[in-house]
Amino acid sequence: MSAIPATPYHLTAAQQKFYHENGYLLGLPAIYTPAEMAKINAGLPNLLALLKPGETSKDIREWHETSTYLYEIALNPKILDLVEDVLGPNFYLWASNFFIKEPHSPSTVGWHQDAYYWPMAPHNSVTVWLAFDDVDEVNGGMKLIPGSHRGGIIKHNRSTQTSSVLSLELEDGSGFSSDAAIQFRLKAGECSLHDDRAIHGSPANPSDRRRAGLTLRYSGTNVKNDLTVNPNFKIYLCRGVDEFKLNPYGTPPTQRYGRPNFKPVSNEEAGKG
């Protein structure tokens, strides 16, 4: 049997070590060329057109289950190569979510740990953040506390007096200092990786530029979801074998653009706050 050919999307030993020590990874080769990303962006309005009155782009959650537009991105072999080198050979896709800050948007994403919201165990998940636009400190790019994934899960507090799209968040000083945060900078078509326990957030977007990103969530097949909290949870095996069979499977979509016929459990509903 011939060896699997190396690709620039497989992580080096140094990159794997950095990720496991710091909880994130930047500087990865672009997933999509500028021309490919322009084509993907041209399709985004077709999803936005499916939103109902009162909904926003943050309600486009788990639409990979009904849209080949998103499903094909989530199963891009270049992305899966990166994920495999973090999670190992056996893993599944289970969530997708847009985070779009239009120009001059006051919305923020408060400091938080993804794992606090997710009724899943053990902790063996990674988020891929795919930039639809150039992202930096000017238009509200994400910040993350290196090494914070090694400090355990911190209780999040509920706040109604916040500009954050999350009502459960961490306060600066509650086990971490925002002074240690590093700024994520990505070009459209590039992605970052971060651990489900890493503390991260993002400021408002006062600029004239949109800041759009798609998050894709993957977990090792040893991770079980609590269906009493999230009964609509479905997985899509990406690589390897599902030796544990802990979660229900979804059916791959057949239409280009579609929305689920259920409302996914929100972070606030799933959170422990």
Image (cartoon, rainbow, N blue to C red):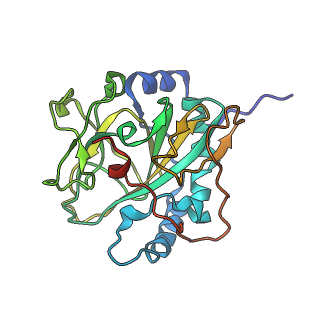
Residue 250: x and y in percent read 64, 54
Camera-side residue: 166 or 72?
A: 166
Camera-side residue: 268 or 35?
A: 268
What residue is drawn where x is 60% and y is 58%?
A: 71
Q: Is residue 267 above or below residue 39?
A: above
Residue 55: x and y in percent read 35, 71
Residue 207: x and y in percent read 21, 61
Q: Would residue 9 be seen by someone viewing this image from the given angle?
A: no
Q: How many numbered marks have been drawn onto this rendered protein structure?
A: 0
Q: Would residue 196 be seen by someone viewing this image from the given angle?
A: yes
- Extreme residue in the left direction: 161
What residue is drawn where x is 47% and y is 44%?
A: 128
Quick one: quadrant of the C terminus? top left
Q: Is residue 232 left or right of residue 175?
A: right
What residue is drawn where x is 17% and y is 49%?
A: 159
Q: Is residue 194 left or right of residue 163?
A: right
Q: Is residue 201 above or below residue 207?
A: above
Residue 269: x and y in percent read 35, 51
Quick one: quadrant of the N terminus? top right
Q: Is residue 185 left or right of residue 90?
A: left
- Extreme residue in the front direction: 228
Camera-side residue: 124 or 131?
A: 124
Q: Is residue 188 above or below residue 158?
A: below
Give the quadrant of residue 73. bottom right
